[in-house]
Amino acid sequence: MSLAIFWTDEATETFDSIVLFIENRWALKQAEGFVKHTQKILSLIADQPYMYKASLNGNNVRQAIISPQTSMFYEIHHEFITILFFWDNRQEPIF
């Protein structure tokens, strides 16, 4: 059974800013590839939410590596998953 996925406002904002950055820095094709890869990972975690490592904040918050430069943090609830935010891995760690 796949869990429903909900995005926080912060997740939407950080995702959109990363997509725009990729599009402006490289090209639309690379940005589209990033979006498709993210969608694939979202589909995977809907079916297997515990497949990525737990963050230091707790077992229900997980970190999925989207690319070497980008991670997605999400929280697992009983009946759904919340996408919390996207993170540039080149920044200082938040946890």
Image (cartoon, rainbow, N blue to C red):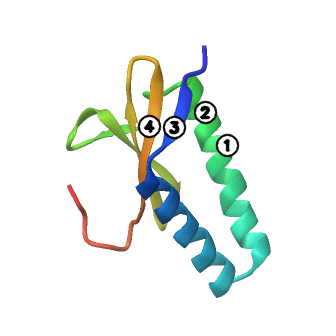
Q: Residues within 10 Å of mark 3 (few under 14, many from 20)?
A: some
Q: Dot 1 lies on which element? A: helix
Instruction: Give the residue number, with chain letter if any, for mark 1.
Output: 40
Q: Between tags 4 and 2, which lies in front?
A: 4
Give the secondary structure at mark 3. Answer: strand
Label 3 vs 2, first from the N-terminus: 3
Gap in angstroms between the C-alphas marked 4 and 3: 5 Å
Q: Earlier in the sequence, mark 1 or mark 3?
A: 3
Query: Where does the image place residue 22, in percent across and percent down from the top left?
Result: 62, 76
What residue is shown at x 65% (from left), y 85% (from top)?
24
Instruction: Please identify the residue farthest to the right as the structure is shown.
Output: 29
Q: CA distance from mark 3 to mark 2?
A: 15 Å
Mark 4 vs 3: CB contact within 8 A: yes
Q: Indicate which disc residue 44 carries.
A: 2
Q: Secondary structure at mark 2?
A: helix
Percent of width and height locating residue 31: 70, 69
Q: Are marks 4 and 2 in contact (CB under 8 Å)?
A: no
Residue indicated by mark 4: 82
The residue located at (73%, 62%) in the rendering is: 33
Q: Is residue 47 above or below residue 52?
A: above
Proximity of marks 1 and 2: CB atoms separated by less than 8 Å: yes
Sequence order check: which comes first, mark 1 or mark 4? 1
- In the image, what residue type sits under mark 4? Thr
Instruction: Name the quarter where the N terminus is drawn.
Output: top right
